Amino acid sequence: MFNQLSDKLRGTIKTLSGRSRLTEANISDAMREVRIALLEADVSLEVTKSFIEQVKVRAVGAEVLGSLQPGQAVIKIVQDELVKLMGDANEVLNLSARPPATIFVVGLQGSGKTTTVGKLGHFLKTRQKKSVLVVSTDIYRPAAIAQLKAIADDLGLNFYPSSQSQKPVDIAMNALQHARKNSIDVVIVDTAGRLHVDEKMMGQAKALQQAVQPIETLFVVDSMTGQDAVNSAQAFAQALPLTGVILTKTDGDARAGAVLSIRRETGKPIKFLGTGEAMDALQPFHPERVASRILGMGDVLSLVEEVERKTDQDQAEKLMKKITQGKGFDLEDFRDQMMQIQNMGGMMGMVEKLPGMGKLSQQALDQVGDKKTDQSIAIVNSMTPHERKFPAVIRASRKQRIAAGSGTQVQEVNRLLKQFLQMQKMMKRMKKKGAVKGLLDQFHGGAMPGRRF
């Protein structure tokens, strides 16, 4: 969601980083461009003015004008101020309550609230090892309760049944009682979507919140609505004691205004970002990592965590044994590695977290895009088991059959086979040098002390 803002900020800062000496005049010119970039990203005027003022005060001071690398000093200041704007550090959920810790989830109609409840439950279950009960108090939207039940069943979460004939307060209190009896760690209460101008519905939300007394009250909002998301968050924060915000749909081509404005405008921290449709596409919000991505510096820590969480360790060890025992690296292994990349959010999801990737042309990005990965997997799947193990038998007639079966062209089959041969040669060279184990250990377990990928 930061592409447009990132491009403009990087372009502006690049003009500064190439200078051996900075003056107040060229810093002011650069800040004028930064101001335009922020406003076009739908950051509020007040937040933009405050941000620019803070950067200018520091940029025209001794820490920049007296620096040996003034351009780099300005980049560091912009990064620091972006982090400060978004909240300094990650704020985790507060679950330090006598079980069950209760999380109350509110939001506008159509913001993705019920799906986010499922994602949050899945996050707590898989990454924090909590037992989770979800319950819907939405007695107004048809099929709202059935939707949450379907999500809970898919994710293996506990679900407390309710019906449209019940009162929301009764549903919530009964669910809490059930959780206490069954020693459940966390209860997530899904509420009806409501407009912040609907006084009756907001009154019901207040009554429900007061009855439940949750330790966390989270506001879910669609990031693609830009400054409207901030306005909605302000309205809900005035009506309810919010403890945080979850921004959904941040994987889309959205303006970054909500991410950069919400903390300053509402005083409430962003706790999570919804980054896709998959149920594991919910990420804790780290201001310093987002600032790095905005400035094109990547987000290596998030990438490391993604690999750690989603890499199949058993499969990696099998591949290592196979190669070190001289059995070779075949097309099935090649396909399996591409499928692991898909499990980690796709190639583009990984690429955007690498430093400097924002400098690549669109043509270069297209060559490593997720469409190419899907295409490559389809090509390998169109081969016979014998062809996957012995790709040397794949001649012209077989290539035509494989291309037809995968919906591609023969040149695409040739491209994949060329990539595979390059990978195979690399594996053979590393085997001779005894480097295969080191490489796989580095990627799947030894890259960072105390981490296991």
Image (cartoon, rainbow, N blue to C red):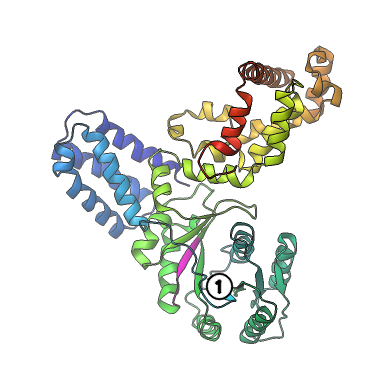
* Residue 407 visible somewhere in the drawing: no
Q: Is residue 245 left or right of residue 314?
A: left
Q: Residue at x 23, y 48 (%)?
A: 55
Provide the residue span drawn in magenta.
241-246
Element type at marker 1?
A: strand
**Which residue is tagged 1?**
103
Q: Nearer the viewer, residue 147 or 322?
A: 322
Q: Residue at x 61, y 65 (%)?
A: 117
Q: Is residue 393 left or right of residue 333?
A: right
Residue 86 to residue 238: above or below: above
Residue 63 to residue 337: above or below: below
- Image coordinates of residue 256 in percent, x first then y, are 42, 51
The amino acid at mark 1 is: Ile
Per the image, is 244 magenta? yes
Per the image, is 65 magenta? no
- Image coordinates of residue 417 in percent, x first then y, are 71, 19
- Image coordinates of residue 367 in percent, x first then y, are 58, 27
- Image coordinates of residue 142 in percent, x first then y, are 70, 73
Q: Is residue 277 left or right of residue 245?
A: right
Figure quadrant of the C terminus: top right
